[in-house]
Structure formats: structure tokens, C-alpha cells
């Protein structure tokens, strides 16, 4: 279908279009035109990705000077692969239309674990080990040594890539992980480095958040991306957590021990090198004196983790004198590690700001702030000089050096908390030093500054006004789209009481109450009786899940559930959970029906879709509040209140509701799909919770559905299921939730916008 | 008393439908007469009685029920004033007597006959065949059942669905108190079968222990005492024979986990794309997490999962087993390979791609014209194009075929490629001239239409004749199938069968086909022989074959 979106011709690879897709493209185009950032919420399963790609590809073709690159960030590997397949379909459509290949290259970048084709290395399951072994084969000094000594193994794929592949470019087209691997295998080149190389020239790059948000990796991978690019963060409802994650460090006793061991190793290696040939060390020293950060262009392979500090903070000064010498630096680090050791030897919880920490360290071990800032950089240089390829052994020391650099660079927005033991087990000493970022905007700020358009989009971003606050940016466009439906294909309900009129809630006072637990069980039993195929049920935490299941076993509820459906439960072991999921799908597909008990905020709630028969009903048991007693959370809440004027409760509710919405949103993937969404907690009925749900759910959560007992909800569901079971044809949808080109032109832009949008003032 | 039968037993104070009367157990029947009447109001011949039932012990009412073959039932309540013990004694005496009498009268229903009857009613085609062949005495009944029916019988057996395993079968075994503070578990053969199906380890144990080391009941007692059954107990190192079973189950599960998850969309481990070492980020590392929570609960959850896996697997087994039985070796082999999806890298990527594309399709956005074209798979294309042509004609057909061979080739090529592809590149279609040529050849009178009957005959045939014709075809084909199956007759048995089949064909010809032809001529003369010509052709070719074979045999002898 050929669309005209405010003067831009967009080729849309389908015969029909949803009204919200059209409006989405209009809004997106406006944001790109204005060279501003935007925040777009569109219901899951309404073809967000394809609209996004269609518009941006069209834009790139028409105004190549305005917009030259799309960087698409998504959260999980399957999501990334889905984006690439969508892109492939779009480009195929283009080809059919124009009868020629269009010069657009789309490429994925993933970790070595997913891309390696070396016959030994790829057998490894653990990503860290793959990285380490790869470094062992590809580091520049290893390759130098290989030139003189054939017995030093190198990776032939990488060698060939260096010799021939470095200059060549991928043919236009779409390259998924498998495509890259088969291309690499055909050419004999390393797929990982093909992809790394391609990031600089490909028109569309798809990778995970970390490659852009985490300064440690972004500096290596995404340095060369030009300003006039569009950056898309898909599934961005958790973007603040990723930002915080990328800037935080945690020091445990184990790390300290291993760091000490690392230091001993380092000292030994330095001594050895001094005896054998001090040339390298003097050369390095000279470099430090010259104050050149990195005179030599670092080989791509040599960089394992870059400086954890953001690019605009990069220090241009010379490295201070007291850590220029290798041995001095090792001594310096030893002092720092000893200091951390002392800090971990506490009996009570300590909480302090980075400034306090710096002052303390000055007093106790006389370490100045300035050299600390260079610790990460200096260590990286030293490891290189010492020709240590596999830096996984030194990871503990690297962590410590990053802590040093971070703590001395940022004084605001961070906190240090030392906990001598875990709250649940006060008798087992397990000291942890948390260096925690409190401000998500720190990591994301350079992205907003650097690129002309950043698109933040997801199925669940409500309430929209929260994100500009916590990420500290000014969006040009901020819109939430509703879902136009020809039939009410989602049935959200709030169940607030059991059949015995006892209020059900997961709040702390009543969560262990037997009658509440039983009522939850009864609700589930009734649901399982009437809902066909798959039912998914989310709990607020693993602990709660475990205790409830145990209680249900005693009450005989588990047996009743098993009588109707096969029971699968998410566990803390991801492999076991994957197996359970696989079997859950199998059971649904056999028509046997199954029920999955899962956990909000768990891996399942974040990455697995339960479309169509896999999830005909989702039950959210309780409100998935984050564990509120944690000191880190408290510190963050305080910071948010002081800096961004966000009330604690507002943030907590926002956080809980976005996770609840994520969970229930898993069931609907498209307009032909249908599913029941049950929010089983009395507290959901209150206005401040309800209003934080995404528009498209809220719209169908009418007042008669917000305070139901178990039985009432079952009645509603029964009626609704009968209605949904009727055949549903395209004709039913046409004109309402599905448009042809003619209808689109006739309706006029304004009308459609009206239909699909609620502008938030 | 209406008959001269002997009364074997007479019990008074028996209530039937709330009226008191006397029950008579007689030679050939069970009768009941209301008090103060002289006509028997209930009278069941023993032959009509299917079975008798008595009220369970401990019930206040002492009753006896007889169920008839037509599933009607009469209930008699014993209300002897002498109290319950007396009532029971009376009831039991009636019961015992009936127990002796009933088997004598049990109609010896021929089970086989019943089955055959059922088979015939279930399969209308078979019934038709039976009517045509057996009732018209073309073949004998025995022959029919031996030769023509087995196909249906087998089909019936094969179609039987194996019974699945209920997810809650273990829970359905409800313990009952046995009166003195003990527990009684009721096990039916179904439940045992379910347990064995779901827990193969238990089956192995059972085979190992019963009856060499312990009795059946001991085994199950142990089972119910084990942690294996009670999922909320942790298995400690006690000497439980089922400890090993649990271990085997765990190993099976680990093996399955190790073998990897083929579906990339559910493999949670591979979701993340970061490889940071410990210490970076805020994520709590798994090692710290594992010791939180209640181990008993975690163990129980694991068992629940395991149970569901095994129930599912049990069903899977039965499906594949069923497949083997039904489709024979070859089919089962292919189906199992499909289901297994081999561990090759190649395969994994294909599956992955398919799964992802599945997830991306928006059915409602797609244009509707993309209809799924079924692929026409012909083993012999020429047959399809010619239609039934008799041997005699084939020699004359050869030149015609030559003439239009270019058209044929083109057509064949098109047939072999799926229809969808021809949609896409119209350039690959045949030229108009060729097409017109082909249409001409395929019209009545064209070279490719020889041997076809005229359309007109179909519209002129009355409905009843048509159905008769159908049944005739059915019977003929069945007989011919058997006839042709005898060739080449390599064994004496086959030779013999060929001869009998030949005779049967002749009989059929005389008994069925001839009368039908006569009727056709009588009722709708215009059709005359036209309508049966093909049938005759079929039969004639069979006769010819037989004649040739006989001739050869004679020559051989000479």
C-alpha cells in the first residue's frame, strides 16, 4: 500500500492498515521533521515495528541528507530478530514495487556468543568465556606473536577478515544473526567483526540497549554513529532501569578477594617483564608522560571494556604522575582495594554520598580524587602493555577500577550503600558495597544530546508524563494511541473480593491470610474451568508464589487446577523455566490446556508473548510493587523527590502499574487475538492505580468492571467468551479497525487521528 | 398363578413401588403380586434379566434390583417386620437363588454376530457390499468376512484413540479411612495404567519387585507411603525404593534441559545480550538468590512441573505408538522424524526463522487474495490427463498424443509446479495459440477426450438408477480388486483364489449386472448399454486376463 503521510510517500508492506498505525506514522514523521525526541505508546500487537520501519525507511530514501541512519534498540535477542525479519519483509515489498534491489543494509550486532563460528569457541555456553577465548585468539599482541611463532593459535576467521573483509562492504539487504553466520562461514570471515564493521556504514543497525546506553560498550561499538540518525528504543518501559544498571557497580567480598589475587598476579608479571625487557614499560611510561591518552589507534579487538564514564566526561588531561609507573599504579590499586576491604568490614549499614566516600578515602589511605579518576583508563593500558589477552581473569580488578573512576567522577546522582548482611539472613555475614546510580538521565543524556531524534516507544508507557521527568528530556511529540477494535477483544476486570466477600489483596498485612490465599485459588479454579487453552497467572514475587502454591497444595486447590489443566510454574532456574514454557506451549497446542504460574518482573513477564491460544486469560495476583524496604530504592525515591519533584508514592505506583500492564499485555498480540485480563487485588480499583494503566486497557475497563467478586467476574467472562468464539472476519473489521487505501483517503487524516489518539496535554 | 410353574421361593413383605406384596421366584420368571390381589403385577422372565443389584451394606433400606436388557429396572424392598437382619437374610436368599438361575437363561448372545452387526451398521459401504454380494449369494458369508471385511475391522481398531492421562490422576486417588484410623486407597486398573504411563520409572520398579520381592498390594502401599507420592515431602536418604525413581526423573529432566531449547522465543537464557562479569550492574546474581525461600516449597514446585512434563510426555508416547500401529512402519518413521526435529544447526535456524515469522504475521493486514493453493501431486500425469481409456483404444491414441505433445509437456510442467508460482509470473504461462489448441483437444471430440462418455448421459440418468449404478461399481471394484490381487498367481493358493474369483465375477455378472442392464433398457431405453459399458469393459478385461492365464497354463502343461 502506498501512503501519503504529510507529503512523504511511504510504502507499507500490507494491503490493509490499522488506523493507529497510520496515526503513529504521522506522529513519528512530525517528530523527525522537528528533529526532536518523541514518546509514543501504542498497544502491543498493532504493528508498531512495521509502521516504524516503513516510515523511517521511506524518510531515509526521500531525504537522505536529513536522516542517514536508524539505530534500533530492543531488549531481548528474539525481539531483535523479529525486527530484522520485519525489515526483510519491508525491503522485499520495496523490491516487488520497484523491481530492483534498494540500497539499504540492515544489520544486527550481538555478543560474540551469538555470532561466533569458530569451531571450538562457539561450543561454549557462557558469554563471558566466549569473549575471553575470542580475545585470546584475536588480541593484537597474540597476532604479533603468531607472526613469529606458528604455534600461537589465532582465529582464522578473524585473520581473513582483517586481510580481506575489512575493506569490503556487505551487499544491501538484511542480515540476521544466522545470515551473518552463514555469510561469515561462506567467506571465511568472522561474523562478529563483520557486524562491528557494518555498524559504521549500515543504514539500519539493530542491537540491544547496552550497545548504546552503556558507556563501557557504547564507546567501543557506537562511537561512529552520526548525529543525523534516529535512535529507537523499543519496549522502552524499563529504559530507566537499563540506564541505572549500566552505571552501577557492586562490590562483594568475593570480588575483593579476587581483586587482591589479581594484583599479586599483576605485580609478578610486571617484575617478570622488567627482568626480561623493560622496553614496553618504559614506552608506556613515556606515553603517560606525554599525556596522550591513546596515541596509538587501539585495535578493535584490544578494547574489552571502555571507560565507564560518559564520552563528554572523558578526561583530556595527562595521567597524574603517581600512577604513571606500572608498579606505582599496582601499589595504588592495592591501597584502594585494602580500603574497600576495611569498608566492607562493617557491622551496620552505611550510606553515604560519593563526596563523603572520597573524603574518607583521602583521610584513611591518602588517595586523591584525581588519580582515582584515571584508574579504569590506566588499568586498561597496563593490561594491554602486559599483553594479557584474556581479561576475564582480571574482571574483578576491572570492576574495582571502574568503581574508582565512577566514584571520583560523579558526585551527584549516585549513592554508596554498604550492607553487612542481607535483610532476610541477619546472621550470615555477606557484606556488599553498592555503588548505585540513582538518576536514569545520566546515562541517557548523551544519547538525547547527540542524536537528532530519539524515539521511545512501547506498548505500555503510561503514564506518559513520567518518562520525560525521570529521563530529563523534552519530547517534541508525546502521544498515547488507543486500540480501535471491531469487537471488544480484551476484557479487563478488577476482581476485588472473593465469593465470601472477603477483600482480596496482596498487601503485606493480608498476604498470608488463609482466606485471601484461598480466594485467589478459587478465582483461578473458576477461571480455569471456563477459559479454553492457556491461562497465565502472575504473582508479585517468587517468594509469594512459592508460599501461595504451598498453601494451595494443602487446600487442595492445586489438585482442582490439575484436573482442568496441566500446571506449570516458573522457577528461579531459567533453564527449568524454559523447559516449563516449552511444555506449556506444547500442552496448549495439543488442546489439552495449561496454566502457567509466573512472576511479574521475572524473565517470562518481560520476554515471552502469550498470543492467541497461549494466553486466553491473564490473572495478575496482587499489585507488583517493588520490594519497598530496600535502602537503595529508598535512596532513589528520595533522589527523585528532591531532584525531579516526583512523590514516592507516585513513582512506586507508576512502577508497579507498568509491570502489571506488561504482564497482562502479554496476552494480546493483534486484533484477531482476544484475552481476559484480570487484576485481582482490591487496590486496583482505586482511581490512582487505574489511571496509570495504558489507555488502550483503561478504555475497556469500564466502571461496571472495576469492583467485581469472583463469581461476577466469571459471569462476565463466560458471556464474553461466547461472544469471542463467534467467527471473526475481515469484513467485520473493515472501516473500523482496519482500513483499505480508499477508506484511508476518504476518511481524512483528522478523523483517523481522532479515532486512534488521545493527546495528553 | 397363571402358569403351572413351580414356585421355588416365596417372600412376603416385599415393597415394590411403595406397595407391599409378595415376591415369587419361579422356574422361569421372577414375579411380584400385590397383597390382596390375585394378578401378578410384575413378571420378568429370567431371559430378559441382564443383571441383579443389591443395596450396599449399611444402607437402611434392604433392596434388590433387577436390570433388564432394555435397561429398564425394578426395585424390590424387603420390609420384613423381623428387623434388618431378617430382611437381609431374605434378600440374600433371593439373590443366591437368582444367581443360580440367571446364568441358565442367559441368552447366549453370539458375541461375534453382534460385533459383525455393529460393524455393518457402522459402515454403510460395507453393508451395501454385504447386501450385494452375500444376500444375492454371489459369495458366501464366510468368504465375505474373511476377505472383504478385514480392512474395515482393522480400520476400526486402528481408529480407537488411546486414553490420555488426566493431569490430576494422582490426586483422584483419594484415601478413605477404613474405620480404624487407617487409610485405604482405591486403585483401579485405569489409575495404575496412568501411573505407569506417566512414570515409567515406577513401571520398571514394579516389574522388578512384583511379584518376586513383594506382592502387588505391598508395592502400592509402599508407593503411597513414599515421598514420591506425597510431593510436599523432601526425599531424604531413607531406604525407600522410590528414592531412585525420583532421581531418575530428575536426571531425565536435566537431560532435557541440557539438550537445549529449540524454540528461541522461549529460551530465557539466551534472551539477554550482555556478557558482563559479576559486579557490574544491579542485577542480583543467581548464586545469592538460590538460598532464599523455602526449600520444601521449591522442591514441590519442581515436582509439579515434573509431573506436568511427564503427563504430557505420556500422551506423546501414546500418540507415536498409535501412529506406528495405524500407518505402518514407513509413515510412523517420517512422522517421528518430523516431531523429533533433529539437532542439526541447519534445522534449528530453520525452526527459529519459522517461529519468528509466525509471530510476525498479521493475518488481518494481509491481502485476502493470497489463497493457499494446494499442490497437486500426481504420480502419473498422463493418466490424469487422459482419463480412463481402454487398452484397445490406446494404440490409436498414440498419434494424437504426438500431435499435441508440446501442449502436454507444457501442461504437465504447470501441473507439477504449485499453482501459486504460476500466479506470480504470468510470463511462464503457455501461449494463447497453444492454449486454444489444448482446449480444443480437451473438448468433446478432441483427441484427448476419447473414451469419455457424453455429458448428456449423466443428466439423463434417473436418480435411483444412478445410486444403483454406484453400488454396482462398489461391488465390482471390490471383487475386481481381489481378482487382480491374485495376479501373478505364484502360489497354488493364489491360483485357486483366482479361479474362484473368476467364478464369483461371473456369478455377479449374472446375478446383478444382467438384471440391472435389463432394467435400464426397460426403464430408460435411450441410455441402454451406454451406462454399463464401462462396467462391462472392466469385467471383460478381467475375463480376458483370466482366459489368457488359463491358456498359458494349459500350454505350460502340455
Image: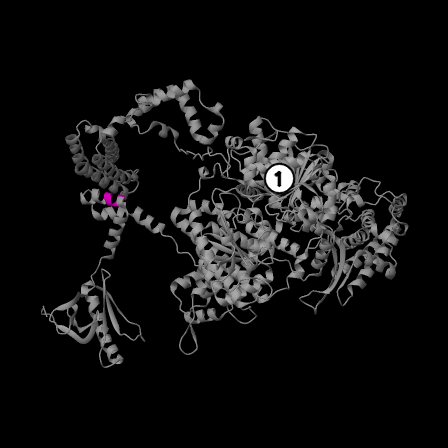
- Can residue B230 be spotted in the picture? no
Q: Position of residue B505 (x, y in %)?
A: 22, 38
Question: In the picture shown, does residue B46 fall above or below B552?
Answer: below
**Where does the C terminus of chain A fall, quadrant-wise?**
top right
Question: Residue A491: where, in percent of width, then height?
Answer: 49, 50
Can you name the residue that lies furthest to the top here? B433
Q: Residue lying furthest front in this view?
A: A761
Principal SS element in the magenta part?
helix
Residue A289 occupies quadrant: top right
The magenta region covers B125-129
Q: Is residue A82 magenta?
A: no
Is A439 on the left-hand or right-hand side of A523? Answer: right
- Residue named by callout 1: A176
| Whole-percent x, y for residue A179 in the image | 61, 38
**Residue under the image location 78 percent in, 47 percent down:** A307
Of residues A326 and A276, which is closer to you in this image? A326
Q: Residue A398 or A34: which is nearer the viewer?
A: A34
Q: With A389 as the anchor, is A523 left or right in this view?
A: left
Say which chain tag 1 marks. Answer: A
Q: Secondary structure at mark 1?
A: loop
Amino acid at each position: 500500500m502506498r501512503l501519503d503521510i504529510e507529503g512523504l510517500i511511504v510504502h507499507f508492506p500490507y494491503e490493509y492498515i490499522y488506523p493507529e498505525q497510520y496515526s503513529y506514522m504521522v506522529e513519528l514523521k512530525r517528530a523527525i521533521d522537528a528533529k526532536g525526541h518523541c514518546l509514543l505508546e501504542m498497544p502491543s500487537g498493532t504493528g508498531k515495528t512495521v509502521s516504524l520501519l516503513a516510515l523511517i525507511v521511506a524518510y531515509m530514501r526521500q531525504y537522505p541528507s536529513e536522516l542517514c541512519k536508524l539505530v534500533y534498540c530492543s531488549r531481548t535477542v528474539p525481539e531483535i530478530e523479529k525486527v530484522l525479519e520485519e525489515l526483510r519483509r519491508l525491503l522485499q515489498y520495496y523490491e516487488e514495487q520497484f523491481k530492483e534491489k534498494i540500497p539499504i543494509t540492515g544489520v544486527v550486532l550481538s555478543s560474540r556468543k551469538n555470532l561466533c563460528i569458530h569451531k571450538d569457541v562457539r561450543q561454549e555456553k557462557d558469554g563471558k568465556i566466549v569473549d575471553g577465548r575470542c580475545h585470546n585468539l584475536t588480541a593484537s599482541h597474540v597476532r604479533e606473536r603468531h607472526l613469529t611463532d606458528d604455534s600461537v593459535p589465532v582465529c582464522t576467521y578473524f585473520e581473513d577478515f582483517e586481510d580481506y573483509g575489512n575493506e569490503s562492504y556487505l551487499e544491501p539487504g538484511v542480515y540476521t544473526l544466522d545470515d551473518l553466520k552463514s555469510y561469515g562461514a561462506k567467506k571465511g570471515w568472522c561474523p562478529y567483526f563483520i557486524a562491528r564493521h557494518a555498524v559504521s556504514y549500515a543504514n539500519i543497525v539493530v542491537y540491544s540497549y547496552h550497545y548504546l546506553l552503556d558507556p563501557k560498550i557504547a564507546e567501543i561499538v557506537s562511537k561512529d554513529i552520526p548525529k543525523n540518525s534516529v535512535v529507537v528504543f523499543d519496549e522502552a518501559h524499563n529504559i530507566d532501569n537499563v540506564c541505572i544498571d549500566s552505571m552501577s557497580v557492586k562490590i562483594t567480598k568475593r570480588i575483593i578477594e579476587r581483586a587482591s589475587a589479581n594484583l599479586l598476579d599483576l605485580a609478578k608479571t610486571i617484575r617478570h617483564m622488567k627482568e626480561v625487557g623493560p622496553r614496553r614499560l618504559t614506552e608506556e611510561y613515556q606515553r603517560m608522560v606525554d599525556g596522550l591518552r591513546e596515541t596509538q589507534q587501539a585495535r578493535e579487538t584490544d578494547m574489552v571494556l571502555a571507560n565507564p564514564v560518559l564520552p563528554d566526561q572523558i578526561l583530556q588531561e595527562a595521567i597524574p604522575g603517581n600512577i604513571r609507573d606500572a608498579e606505582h599504579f599496582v601499589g595504588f590499586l592495592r591501597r584502594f582495594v585494602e580500603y574497600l576491604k576495611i569498608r566492607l568490614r562493617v557491622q551496620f549499614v552505611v550510606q553515604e554520598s560519593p563526596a563523603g566516600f572520597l573524603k574518607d578515602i583521602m583521610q584513611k589511605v591518602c588517595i586523591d580524587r584525581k588519580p582515582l579518576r584515571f584508574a579504569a583508563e590506566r588499568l586498561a593500558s597496563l593490561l594491554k602493555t602486559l599483553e594479557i589477552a584474556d581479561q576475564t581473569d582480571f574482571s574483578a580488578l576491572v570492576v574495582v577500577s571502574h568503581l574508582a573512576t565512577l566514584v571520583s567522577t560523579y558526585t551527584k546522582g549516585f549513592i554508596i550503600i554498604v550492607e553487612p548482611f542481607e535483610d532476610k539472613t541477619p546472621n550470615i555475614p555477606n557484606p556488599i558495597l553498592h555503588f548505585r546510580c540513582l538518576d536514569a538521565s545520566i546515562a541517557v543524556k548523551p544519547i538525547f544530546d547527540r542524536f537528532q531524534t530519539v524515539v521511545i516507544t512501547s506498548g505500555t508507557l503510561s503514564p506518559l508524563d513520567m518518562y520525560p521527568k525521570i529521563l530529563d528530556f523534552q519530547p517534541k511529540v508525546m502521544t498515547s494511541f488507543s486500540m480501535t477494535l471491531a469487537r471488544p477483544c480484551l476484557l479487563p476486570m478488577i476482581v476485588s473480593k472473593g465469593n465470601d466477600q472477603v477483600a482480596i489483596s496482596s498487601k503485606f498485612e493480608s498476604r498470608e491470610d488463609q482466606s485471601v490465599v484461598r480466594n485467589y485459588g478459587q478465582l483461578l479454579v473458576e477461571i480455569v474451568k471456563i477459559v479454553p487453552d492457556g491461562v497465565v497467572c502472575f504473582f508479585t514475587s517468587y517468594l509469594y508464589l512459592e508460599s501461595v502454591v504451598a498453601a494451595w497444595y494443602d487446600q487442595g486447590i492445586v489438585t482442582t487446577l490439575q484436573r482442568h489443566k496441566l500446571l506449570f510454574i516458573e522457577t528461579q532456574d531459567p533453564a527449568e523455566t524454559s523447559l516449563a514454557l516449552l511444555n506449556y506451549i506444547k500442552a496448549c497446542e495439543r488442546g489439552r490446556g495449561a496454566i502457567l504460574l509466573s512472576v511479574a518482573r521475572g524473565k517470562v513477564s518481560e520476554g515471552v508473548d502469550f498470543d492467541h491460544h497461549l494466553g486466553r486469560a491473564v490473572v495478575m495476583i496482587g499489585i507488583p510493587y517493588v520490594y519497598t524496604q530496600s535502602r537503595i530504592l529508598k535512596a532513589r525515591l528520595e533522589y527523585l523527590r528532591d531532584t525531579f519533584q516526583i512523590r514516592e508514592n507516585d513513582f512506586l505506583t507508576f512502577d508497579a502499574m507498568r509491570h502489571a500492564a506488561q504482564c497482562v499485555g502479554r496476552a494480546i498480540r493483534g486484533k484477531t487475538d482476544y484475552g481476559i485480563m484480570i487484576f485481582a487485588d482490591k487496590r486496583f480499583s482505586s482511581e490512582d492505580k487505574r489511571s496509570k494503566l495504558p489507555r488502550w486497557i483503561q478504555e475497556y475497563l469500564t466502571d461496571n468492571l472495576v469492583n467485581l467478586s469472583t463469581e461476577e467476574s466469571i459471569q462476565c467472562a463466560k458471556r464474553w467468551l461466547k461472544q469471542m468464539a463467534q467467527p471473526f472476519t475481515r469484513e467485520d473489521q473493515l472501516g473500523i479497525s482496519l482500513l483499505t487505501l480508499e477508506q484511508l483517503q476518504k476518511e481524512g487524516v483528522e478523523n483517523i487521528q481522532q479515532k486512534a489518539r488521545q493527546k495528553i496535554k | 398363578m397363571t402358569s403351572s410353574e413351580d414356585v421355588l421361593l416365596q417372600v412376603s413383605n416385599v415393597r415394590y413401588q411403595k406397595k407391599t406384596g409378595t415376591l415369587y421366584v419361579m422356574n422361569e420368571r421372577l414375579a411380584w403380586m400385590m397383597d390382596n390381589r390375585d394378578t401378578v403385577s410384575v413378571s420378568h422372565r429370567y431371559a430378559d434379566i441382564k443383571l441383579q443389584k443389591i443395596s450396599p451394606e449399611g444402607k437402611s433400606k434392604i433392596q434388590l434390583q433387577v436390570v433388564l436388557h432394555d435397561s429398564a429396572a425394578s426395585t424390590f424392598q424387603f420390609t420384613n417386620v423381623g428387623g434388618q437382619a431378617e430382611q437381609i437374610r431374605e434378600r440374600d436368599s433371593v439373590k443366591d437363588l437368582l444367581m443360580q438361575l440367571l446364568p441358565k437363561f442367559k441368552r447366549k448372545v453370539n458375541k461375534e454376530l453382534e460385533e459383525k452387526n455393529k460393524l455393518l451398521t457402522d459402515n454403510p459401504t460395507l453393508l451395501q457390499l454385504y447386501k450385494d454380494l452375500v444376500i444375492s449369494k454371489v459369495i458366501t458369508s464366510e468368504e465375505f468376512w474373511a476377505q472383504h471385511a478385514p480392512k474395515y475391522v482393522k480400520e476400526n481398531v486402528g481408529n480407537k484413540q488411546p486414553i490420555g492421562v488426566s493431569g490430576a490422576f494422582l490426586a483422584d486417588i483419594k484415601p478413605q479411612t477404613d474405620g480404624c484410623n487407617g487409610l485405604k486407597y482405591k486403585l483401579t486398573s485405569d489409575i495404575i495404567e496412568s501411573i505407569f504411563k506417566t512414570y515409567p520409572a515406577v513401571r520398571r520398579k514394579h516389574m522388578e519387585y512384583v511379584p518376586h520381592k513383594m506382592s502387588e498390594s505391598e508395592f502400592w502401599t509402599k508407593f503411597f507411603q513414599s515421598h514420591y507420592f506425597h510431593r510436599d515431602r523432601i526425599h531424604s536418604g531413607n531406604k525407600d525404593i522410590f528414592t531412585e525413581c525420583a532421581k531418575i526423573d530428575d536426571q531425565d529432566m536435566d537431560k532435557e534441559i541440557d539438550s537445549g531449547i529449540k524454540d528461541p522465543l522461549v529460551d530465557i537464557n539466551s534472551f539477554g545480550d550482555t556478557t558482563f562479569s559479576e559486579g557490574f550492574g544491579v542485577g542480583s546474581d543467581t548464586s545469592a538468590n538460590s538460598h532464599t525461600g523455602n526449600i520444601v516449597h521449591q522442591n514441590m514446585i519442581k515436582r509439579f512441573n515434573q509431573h506436568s512434563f511427564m503427563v504430557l510426555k505420556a500422551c506423546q508416547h501414546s500418540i507415536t505408538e498409535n501412529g506406528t500401529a495405524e500407518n505402518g512402519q514407513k509413515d510412523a518413521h517420517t512422522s517421528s522424524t518430523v516431531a523429533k526435529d533433529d539437532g542439526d544447526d541447519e534445522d534449528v535456524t530453520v525452526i527459529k526463522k519459522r517461529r519468528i515469522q509466525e509471530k510476525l504475521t498479521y493475518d488481518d493486514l494481509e491481502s485476502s487474495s493470497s489463497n493457499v493453493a494446494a499442490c497437486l501431486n500426481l504420480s502419473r500425469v498422463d493418466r490424469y490427463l487422459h482419463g480412463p481409456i481402454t487398452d484397445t483404444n490406446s494404440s490409436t491414441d498414440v498419434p494424437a498424443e504426438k500431435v499435441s505433445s508440446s501442449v502436454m509437456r507444457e501442461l504437465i510442467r504447470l501441473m507439477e509446479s504449485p499453482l501459486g508460482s504460476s500466479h506470480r509470473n504470468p510470463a511462464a504461462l503457455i501461449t494463447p495459440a497453444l492454449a486454444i489448441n489444448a482446449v480444443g483437444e480437451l473438448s468433446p471430440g478432441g483427441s484427448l477426450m476419447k473414451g469419455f462418455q457424453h455429458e448428456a448421459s449423466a443428466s439423463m440418468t434417473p436418480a435411483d438408477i444412478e445410486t444403483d449404478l454406484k453400488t454396482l461399481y462398489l461391488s465390482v471394484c471390490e471383487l475386481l480388486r481381489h481378482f487382480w490381487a491374485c495376479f501373478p498367481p505364484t502360489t497354488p493358493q493364489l491360483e485357486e483364489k483366482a479361479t474362484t474369483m473368476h467364478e464369483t465375477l461371473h456369478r455377479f455378472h449374472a446375478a446383478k449386472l444382467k438384471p440391472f442392464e435389463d432394467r435400464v433398457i426397460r426403464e430408460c431405453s435411450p441410455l441402454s448399454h451406454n451406462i454399463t459399458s464401462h462396467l462391462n469393459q472392466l469385467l471383460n478385461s478381467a475375463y480376458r486376463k483370466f482366459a489368457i492365464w488359463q491358456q498359458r497354463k494349459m500350454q505350460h502343461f502340455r
